[in-house]
Each structure stands twice: as structure tokens, then as C-alpha cells.
Image (cartoon, helix red, strand yellow):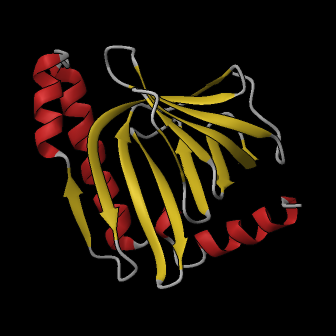
Amino acid sequence: MLVPKPGEKIQIHSYKHNGNIHRIWEETTVLKSTQQLVIGANDRTLVTESDGRTWVTREPAICYFDTDYWFNVIGMIREDGVYFYCNVSSPFVYEDAAIKYIDYDLDIKVFPDMTYVLLDEDEYENHRIEMNYPKSIDSILKKNLNYLTQLIHQRKGPFAHDFIDNWYERYLMYRD
């Protein structure tokens, strides 16, 4: 798999299990990329929903994608601290200047004090039936959700104490 270069601007494409586009983030700056990992950042980027509606993100965010895990993590930098939004998803692929993944509905919102809440269990259950998620996918997602919560509790990976601050400092070097 080809990987983007640091400083390169890419898009992020989120799909649903049935192959339909879910959401597109117009521009993310690559901070680090390997065959396994992409870390990017964006701020006030245009987001287009599947129904054509658009909105603009409100704060700087650091995006963490890893081919080994069925989730990705967005660290949003706000005045009162860092909030994380974790998407349970397929591992990413990079093609056509975009990170692409399948969003599997379940999300975890993590607050600055590292407490968290699991979101969209009802949406997951509905889509699991509607789109006929295989039992193997269901099992993989639950295993990765468990691992994700362990990372949050242990403050490891993208939840490590200085992770977001360090990558945000790097992002500022690429800004105009």
C-alpha cells in the first residue's frame, strides 16, 4: 500500500458496511504515515454527509488510524481539554489520496478526565441486522471495543498523556 507523505493534504472517507459513503472530511494534513499507521490533523475542515449536508469542524483535531485495529481515534482540542471521539471501524486503506474505512456505528466519547460513554448501540444493532453483518465481524468489533477501552483506562496509544499535544505542535509547523 502506498502511503501519504508528511505535510500532504488528504481526505478521509467513511463508508457503511453496504458500501455507501457515510461522511467525507475534505482536508487533513498528514503528520506521520507508515504501512500500518497514519496520524493526521485538521482544523475547521469541511465535512460532507451522505445526504449532501455540510458542516465545518469547530476545533483542531488529531486523527489516529492503524491497520492493526478496528477503530480510529479523533482527539479534539478544546479550551477545557482534549475530548476523544473513537469510531469502531474497519482498519483503514489509503487510496486515491484518501484514508478510507467502514464505520460500524459504535462510538466512544472520552472526556478530558478520561471518563467515557459508549454511543450508538441501538444504531449498531439496527445496522447489524439491516446490513447483515457477519458473526465474525460482530466478534472482531466487540474484541476491538474491549481493547479500545483498555487503552483508554491505561492512557496508552492515542490516549497517552502528551500524544495529542505533541502531534498538535507538529501540525502547527505545517500551517500557513
Residue 115 position by quadrant: bottom left
How far across and down, in percent of the image, does residue 168 sit?
A: 69, 68
> Is 50 or 104 nearer to us in this picture?
50
**Quadrant of the drawing holding the N terminus:** top right
In the displayed structure, 94 sits above or below 10; it is above
In the displayed structure, 78 sits above or below 28; it is below
Give the residue furthest to the right: 176
94 to the left or right of 47: right
Residue 156 visible, this orientation:
no
In the displayed structure, 157 sits above or below 2; it is below
Residue 166 position by quadrant: bottom right
Give the residue furthest to the front: 53
Residue 21 visible, this orientation:
yes
174 to the left or right of 59: right
How far across and down, in percent of the image, does residue 76 sit?
A: 51, 65
Which residue appears at 37% of the width and 72% of the height? 154
How far across and down, in percent of the image, does residue 25 sit?
A: 58, 40
Which residue appears at 65% of the width and 58% of the height? 43
**Quadrant of the drawing holding the C terminus:** bottom right
Which residue appears at 67% of the width and 55% of the height? 41
